[in-house]
Image (spheres, rainbow, N blue to C red):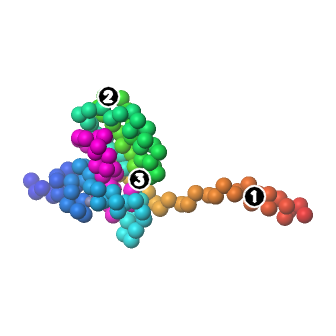
Amino acid sequence: MPERSMPHDASSWACPHGQDARRGCEACYEESTAPGPGLSFWEVVAWFTTDRPIPIRTLQDVHHHGRHFALDQPSAPLVYLLTGEAHARDGVQAVASVIGFLLQNRHVIADFTVTETRATHRSPATPAKPKTTRQTDTWLHERANP
Ligand SMILES: [Zn+2]
């Protein structure tokens, strides 16, 4: 059977830096922090296991991370769910980017094994509406009732 027909062979998981996306890539992580030419927006979910429990404080700190990363423990012990956003060329790089976040935190997440990933392509995020809508309403109201 030709290797390229296998959906999960190693080469199909290689990020642009030659890393296995399921092990994460810090270079991809760095690239994914901002929109760039040829990059599109992805939401990534990755399930992984660890040898040691991740401290609660670490789980909480991730939520304060500025890039909409979240680390949750859905059910079983030592099984975690990482969600994050990435600007990437494709889904493989998006996965490498988000898992690269774990590499950045290897001082607390020393060893992990990614068991399943899902990358969802999103259209570019529309800028959040400024919270001045009420002022606009007021302005329209004043104009309508001089
Ligand atoms: Zn990479």
State the extent of the magenta-drawn residues as a range. Answer: 86-114
Q: Please tell me which residue is depicted at 43% across the width and 57% down the height of the picture.
A: 122
Residue type beneath disc 2: Ala
Residue type beneath disc 1: Gln
For marks 1 and 2, the one nearer the N-term is 2
Q: Which residue is mark 1?
A: 135
Label 3: state its secondary structure: strand
Residue located farthest toward the left when viewing the structure as drawn: 1
Q: Looking at this view, is 120 or 69 the one in front?
A: 69
Q: Residue 35: x and y, percent? A: 42, 65
Q: Please tell me which residue is depicted at 24% across the width and 59% down the height of the picture.
A: 15
Instruction: Give the numbered dot on residue 85.
Output: 3
Label 1: state its secondary structure: helix
Q: CA distance from mark 1 to mark 3?
A: 32 Å
Establish if 12 lies above or below 56. Answer: below
Ligand 1 position by quadrant: bottom left
Q: Please tell me which residue is depicted at 47% across the width and 45% down the height of the picture.
A: 64
Q: Which residue is mark 2?
A: 76
Task: Specify few, some or many for label 3: CA neighbours under 10 Å numbering under 14, 14-19, or 20 or more.
Answer: many
Label 2: state its secondary structure: loop
Q: CA distance from mark 3 to mark 2?
A: 24 Å
